[in-house]
Image (spheres, grey):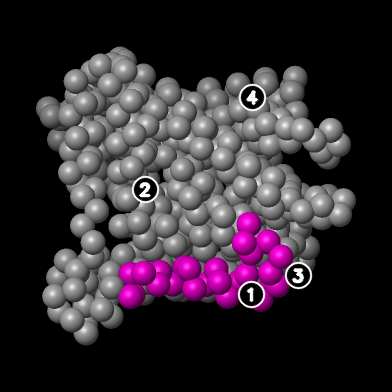
């Protein structure tokens, strides 16, 4: 590959990739108005066409993929922490469980401003899989990851329906919950908004994740990230670059038929859409996620690309701070208790707002990291993780 960077860029590429994922999440959330679907009703036709193109493009590229990259890197970070402690003869497992408890607080803070609930709480619920598998062999970890990524619950319900046509998935009443969420959002009362989000919103989000196949996919991605760490696949070497080229080719080839099959399956009965359809939807998104990850890693070895996306490293190092801050900023911009700009922002304008938010956050990150080693929330999480431990590094 041309113009390979000579230094070991493992940490840099991970930071940049994490920054890319959070940036993509911000763009998707802005287009969705943070799950507040209120948009202009009298836009000119040319703008409606542009808006639809923007929506289709951003969602095709990032929806369901950005969070997946975030989850993959969560598992990788667990490997880094576990390995660092193992070198000292210590077991990081129980400290990791405490770290997940702390993450509940950050998840609640983010959910307070994000009516859809929060993916961080999903990470908390699925995170213990890393604790239980921390001492497993590489082979056992990758096999378990694949099993989870195959979406076993969806296939169980699909087969159960074939055997017994009256079999149905449990009704988790997610639609009814989100209808309640919409009502208190429209009310515009700040405290009702906060209280509803951290209770009903969080519950609806977790149950939606189960319906959408994200529960097992997240666990599988955690283990895949853990495996990538154990195999040192983010280290820049010719062998690893060949590996990522293979991943790119296989994933790109797999994506098209998986996407086509998903569309065909979605034309069937509700039970088939909810089972086999969900599984194929998760698979096509996973394939495209791997295309994005492999492409980014390979392109990052090129000096020109590396220099152009260098700001993502700063952004990725403060991913928790940026992720939560974007929810607070978005709530103030779009919701009735704040500026209530949602009725005036179509997809194009919302995308521009998302980019502007991202650029402001990058500027803040560069300033903050010029004075500190970690972002503000990262620093709190780190210090509280190691409460009662003097020699922690």
Residue highlighted by disc 4? 376
- Quadrant in which the C terminus appears: top right
The answer to whether 17 is drawn above or below residue 325 in the figure is: below
Horizontal relation, residue 77 to residue 34: left or right: right
Q: Which numbered circle lies on residue 366?
A: none
User: Quick one: SS at disc 1?
Assistant: helix
Residue at image coords 84%, 33%: 390
Q: Earlier in the sequence, mark 3 or mark 2?
A: 2
Report the front residue among 371 and 225.
Answer: 225
Q: Which residue is mark 3?
A: 239
Residue 352: x and y in percent read 39, 29
Whether tag 3 and tag 2 are in contact, CB under 8 A, the answer is no
Left-right relation of 63 to 5 = left
Q: Earlier in the sequence, mark 3 or mark 4?
A: 3
Q: Residue at x 57, y 29 (%)?
A: 321
Q: Secondary structure at mark 4?
A: helix
Tag 4: Cα neighbours inside 10 Å, few (<14), some, or many (≥20)?
some
Report the disc number at residue 140: 1
Element marked by disc 2: helix
- Residue picked out by circle 2: 206
Of pointers 1 and 2, the one earlier in the residue sequence: 1
Q: Pointers 1 and 3 in contact (CB under 8 A)?
A: no
Name the foreground residue: 25 vs 238.
25
Camera-nearest residue between 121 and 243: 121
- Ranked by sequence position, the earlier of labels 1 and 3 is 1
Residue 373 on the magenta segment: no
Of labels 2 and 4, the one closer to you: 2
- Residues in magenta? 131-156
Q: Earlier in the sequence, mark 4 or mark 1?
A: 1
How far apart are labels 1 and 3 at the CA level?
A: 23 Å
């Amino acid at each position: 590959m041309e113009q390979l960077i000579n230094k070991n860029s493992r940490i840099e590429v991970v930071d940049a990739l994490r920054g890319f994922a959070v940036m993509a999440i911000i763009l998707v959330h802005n287009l969705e108005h943070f799950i507040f679907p209120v948009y202009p009703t009298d836009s000119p036709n040319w703008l409606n066409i542009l808006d639809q193109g923007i929506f289709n493009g951003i969602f095709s590229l990032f929806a369901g993929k950005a969070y997946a990259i975030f989850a993959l890197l969560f598992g990788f970070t667990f490997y880094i922490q576990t390995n660092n402690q193992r070198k000292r003869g210590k077991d990081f497992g129980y400290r990791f469980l405490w770290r997940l408890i702390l993450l509940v607080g950050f998840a609640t803070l983010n959910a307070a401003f994000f009516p859809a609930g929060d993916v961080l709480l999903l990470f908390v619920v699925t995170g213990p899989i890393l604790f239980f598998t921390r001492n497993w062999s590489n082979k056992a970890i990758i096999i378990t990851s694949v099993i989870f990524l195959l979406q076993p619950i969806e296939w169980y319900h699909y087969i159960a329906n074939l055997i017994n046509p009256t079999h149905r998935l449990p009704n988790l009443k997610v639609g009814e919950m989100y209808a309640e969420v919409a009502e208190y959002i429209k009310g515009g009362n700040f405290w009702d908004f906060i209280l509803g989000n951290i209770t009903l919103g969080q519950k609806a989000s977790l149950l939606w994740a189960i319906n959408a196949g994200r529960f097992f996919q997240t666990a599988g991605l955690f283990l895949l990230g853990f495996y990538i760490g154990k195999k040192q696949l983010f280290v820049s070497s010719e062998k690893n670059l060949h590996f990522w080229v293979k991943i790119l080719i296989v994933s790109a080839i797999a994506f098209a038929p998986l996407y086509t099959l998903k569309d065909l399956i979605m034309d069937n009965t509700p039970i088939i859409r909810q089972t086999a359809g969900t599984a194929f939807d998760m698979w096509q998104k996973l394939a495209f996620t791997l295309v994005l990850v492999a492409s980014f890693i390979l392109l990052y070895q090129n000096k020109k690309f590396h220099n152009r996306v260098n700001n993502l490293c700063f952004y990725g190092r403060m991913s928790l701070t940026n992720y939560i801050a974007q929810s607070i900023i978005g709530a103030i911009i779009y919701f009735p208790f704040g500026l209530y700009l949602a009725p005036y922002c179509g997809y194009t304008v919302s995308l521009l707002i998302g980019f502007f938010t991202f650029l402001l956050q990058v500027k803040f990150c560069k300033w903050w990291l010029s004075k500190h080693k970690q972002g503000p929330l990262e620093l709190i999480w780190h210090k509280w993780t190691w409460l009662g431990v003097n020699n922690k590094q």
